[in-house]
Image: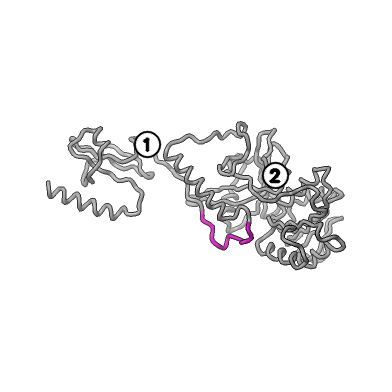
Amino acid sequence: MDAAKSTLNGKRKREDEDTKGDNTNKCVVQEGFSWWTGLMGMENIYEDPLPECSFTISGKNVPVQQEKDTLIAVENVELNEPAIELPCKPEKPSDSDCCGSGCIPCVFDIYDQEIKIWERECARLRNKAVPGEDDLFKKKSMLSELEYRKFTISKVWAETGDTNRYRFKLPFDRDLGLKIGQHIIVRGRSLNETITRQYTPITDIATSGYFDLLIKIYRDGKMSKIISHWKVGDEVEIRGPFGSLEYVPGKYRYILMLAAGTGIAPMSQVVQGILNNEEDETFIHLLYGCHTYKDILMKKELDEWAGYWNFSVTYALSQEQGKNYQYGDKVCERRIDETSIQQEISGKTMDKFMILICGTRSFDEDIMKYCENLGFNQKQIFKF
């Protein structure tokens, strides 16, 4: 018996070393007890049992042994329980992912929220809790900041060579519940990663029955690899809304929008909010930077908005020269620079302007510098 204890103690020591830092459950044995008391009391590590049935632990079937009155039981599991597949832990952003300009929410704020959501989802799966009602028709609000909800894709079409539009279904009499300038967070899952990205719906916030996202597909983008496989009928996890823009109709006489590429998305939401409000007489001018004429996004909508008395747009094309453009289009064949902005504000009172900025990080940094050089104060400038 002493030799047996020595063998068992030696095995326990080796097993403790092997499983240090590992959350895998251990098989344990209770000698000289019945089946039930064997399940309730667990003391020694058993070395060479004979398999009779199995438990599921961490996604693997673990043998359970019984010989006479000796039983190996497993903590916190039940017989014939299917493997539990837990979601991957959210991807932690790197320091370089933060622009340092005080975004609300910051990428690190989003990560902290994602970790809490992930922990709740894992706990729910472990405890076999029933998830909340997924039927959007029964939700008081379409979105939740702290809970992902599934929205079904109803249409996908190409906007340009590398940018698509994705339409998502809503109950026919419901809108998404956004305020002007707010965005959402989309979650995607690959085999071993959970990835999130922020997008601004381009549909008017009052649109019911559906909403659209405008998304550029990057060849090496992690989220792009997931989105490139989206198709009609797929369900996409979304939460929100987020965004700190507080737009007050009539507060500023002029809004100058400085956008590049998909930075048109949040601008489109603001434009529609103003144009669809008959009492809002704010003048909007969009200075929109793209590489070429064919890269202009939402061109059809921009042409329609240009028909309003208080909206105008100038296209700044950095890689076009001497091309014949559509009649009525105002085009400058250069990047947006300080001179471009100066020309748009010339002859107008500076303190009557609100400046909205959205583009790549380098674009945003350059534009912020230009605006400060021209004398705009921080309260007049908002960066999406």
In the picture, which quadrant includes the C terminus?
bottom right
Q: Residue at x 19, y 49 (%)?
A: 8
- State the residue at coordinates (87%, 49%): 309
Query: Is 100 one of the magenta-colored residues?
Result: yes
Circle 1: residue type: Glu
Question: Residue 376: image x %, image y %?
Answer: 76, 63
Count the numbered circles shown. 2
Residue at numbered disc 1: 81
Q: Callout 2, which amino acid?
A: Lys
Question: Residue 103, image x and y in percent?
Answer: 63, 56
Q: Is residue 23 above or below residue 332?
A: above
Residue 359 position by quadrant: bottom right
Question: Which is more N-terminal, label 2 or label 1?
Answer: 1
Callout 2 environment at 10 Å: few (<14), some (14 to 19), or many (20+)? many
- Point out which mark residue 179 bears: 2
The answer to whether residue 230 is above or below residue 262 is: above
Q: Position of residue 192 (x, y in %)?
A: 47, 51
In space, the residues marked 1 and 2 are separated at their CA atoms by: 46 Å
Relative to 235, 17 lies left or right: left
Mark 1 residue crowding within 10 angstroms, few (<14) / some (14–19) / many (20+):
few
Residue 147 belongs to the span the image colors magenta: no
Give the percent coordinates (x, y) of residue 377: 74, 62
Range shown magenta: 91-102
